[in-house]
Image (cartoon, rainbow, N blue to C red):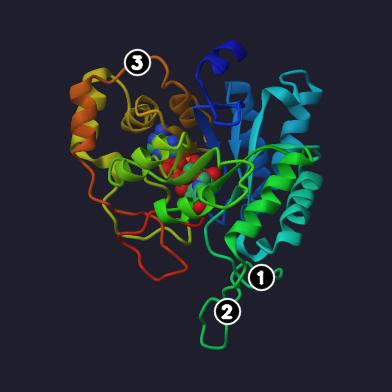
């Protein structure tokens, strides 16, 4: 199984590799933490080696326990797992970036993570409240220069606390700010953004490719409307007739086609499921191929539609980032 996973990995611009399919772990608040732990153990048994989380998801203790148990029972070694965590905007002050990572590492019982991401491009007032607000209910931003936050990320890599560093929810301009930073030591290896046939991010993908930055897609299946920051009453991606027709033609499921679409564009795909059956289903994306015509039809579904709300600017329909 491991050689298979290595085969379906991409090389990042810092020389490390990333498995092309990752397990998402952001679940609606009603999901019990014990369910998360069970799901991670099951996922590792199925063959998942790439796990995506964040300080914000508040599930790193459970994930850490599950991974440690799978190491203890001999299923995997630490090096077989690719684990991502993210720093939230309330920790963007340079002196807090490493503290935040060390807190995650402690919860995870790990000495390093594989990938550490800036969760979004906005610095927020430092403190334990994820969404600091003034008396009018407006988010309180911080004036931290993202470039100094990035230098603190570079330091985390130099200290060996993370193998790779990257960003999430950045647009081209925001990426350029980092890329043009005087004295840049390490480019972001990736930009993790909402991406699916209804929001295919083709321009951002092109930009990232031209800078040897990988695009990592989240909400690849249209996310989960039970989650707080997912906009309700949007057309359901997995019910799309074109997606369903292509799935039927290949005797696959719409979810498998939505994931396969990303892999064939060279995009790393995250998919969250805690159900054993759907985790298995999502893992079977390396066994079939979409034709160029299928890919063209799927490209034609783009309508720049976000499932995730943009919490920081108030726009919900045209932004290329989300925050759950
Ligand atoms: N960087 C960021 O700002 C950011 C934002 C959002 C998400 N993310 C990351 O990306 C991951 C994925 O995004 P997401 O969780 O929002 O959405 P997603 O993976 O697009 O969709 C998850 C939903 O799809 C269901 N599902 C999974 N497999 C399915 C299948 N084969 N058929 C039908 N339904 C299926 C899941 O339910 P079951 O669990 O019941 O199967 C869940 O309700 C997150 O978990 C998180 O790790 C990052």
| In-image side of 76 versus 313 (left or right) | right
User: Is residue 200 visible in this depiction of the protein?
Assistant: no
In the image, the residue with mark 3 has its CB under 8 Å from the nearest atom of ligand 1: no
**Up-down relation of residue 118 to residue 78 (above or below):** below
As helix, strand or loop, the secondary structure at mark 2 comes to loop
Q: Where is mark 2, residue-wise? A: 133
Relative image position of residue 209 (x, y in whole percent): 40, 35
Residue at point 68%, 22% (across, down):
80
Q: For mark 3, what is the residue?
A: 288
Q: Residue furthest bottom?
A: 135
Q: Would residue 150 appear left or right of 241 to someone viewing this image?
A: right
Residue at left offset 46%, top offset 51%: 176
Give coordinates of residue 162: x percent, y percent: 71, 39
Residues 254 and 286: in front is: 286
158 on left or right of 242:
right
Q: Residues within 10 Å of mark 2 (few under 14, many from 20)?
A: some
Of labels 1 and 3, earlier in sequence is: 1
Nearest the eye: 67 or 128:
128
- Report crowding for label 3: few under 14, some 14 to 19, many 20 or more residues within 10 A (C-alpha): few
Please give the residue where the numbered disc 1 appears in the rendered image.
129
Image coordinates for residue 279, horizontal then vertical, percent: 50, 30
Residues under numbered marks 2 and 1 in contact, where contact means CB atoms less than 8 Å apart: yes
Q: Is residue 242 above or below residue 91?
A: above
């Amino acid at each position: 199984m491991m050689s298979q996973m290595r085969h379906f990995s991409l090389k990042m611009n810092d020389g490390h590799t990333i498995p092309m399919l990752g397990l998402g772990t952001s679940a609606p608040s009603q999901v019990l933490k014990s369910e998360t732990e069970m799901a991670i153990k099951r996922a590792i048994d199925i063959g998942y080696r790439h796990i995506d989380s964040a300080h914000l998801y508040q599930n790193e203790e459970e994930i850490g326990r599950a991974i440690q148990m799978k190491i203890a029972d001999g299923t995997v070694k630490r090096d077989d797992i690719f684990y991502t965590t993210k720093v939230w905007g309330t920790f963007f002050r340079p002196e807090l970036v490493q503290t935040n990572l060390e807190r995650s590492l402690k919860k995870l019982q790990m000495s390093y993570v594989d990938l550490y991401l800036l969760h979004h491009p906005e610095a927020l007032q430092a403190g334990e409240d994820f969404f600091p607000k003034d008396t009018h209910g407006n988010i309180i931003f911080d004036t931290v220069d993202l470039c100094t936050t990035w230098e603190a990320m570079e330091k985390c890599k130099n200290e060996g606390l993370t193998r790779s560093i990257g960003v999430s929810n950045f647009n081209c301009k925001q990426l350029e700010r980092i890329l043009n930073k005087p004295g840049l030591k390490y480019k972001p290896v990736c930009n993790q953004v909402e991406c699916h046939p209804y929001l295919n991010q083709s321009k951002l993908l092109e930009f990232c490719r031209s800078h040897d930055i990988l695009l990592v897609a989240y909400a690849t299946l249209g996310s989960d409307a039970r989650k707080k920051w997912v906009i309700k009453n949007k057309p359901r991606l997995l019910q799309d007739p074109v997606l369903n027709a292509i799935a039927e033609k290949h005797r696959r499921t719409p979810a498998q086609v939505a994931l396969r679409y990303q892999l064939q564009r060279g995009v790393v795909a995250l998919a969250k499921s805690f159900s054993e059956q759907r985790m298995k289903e999502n893992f079977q994306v390396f066994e079939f191929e979409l034709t160029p015509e299928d890919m063209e039809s799927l490209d034609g579904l783009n309508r720049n539609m976000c499932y995730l709300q943009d919490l920081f600017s108030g726009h919900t329909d045209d932004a290329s980032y989300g925050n759950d």
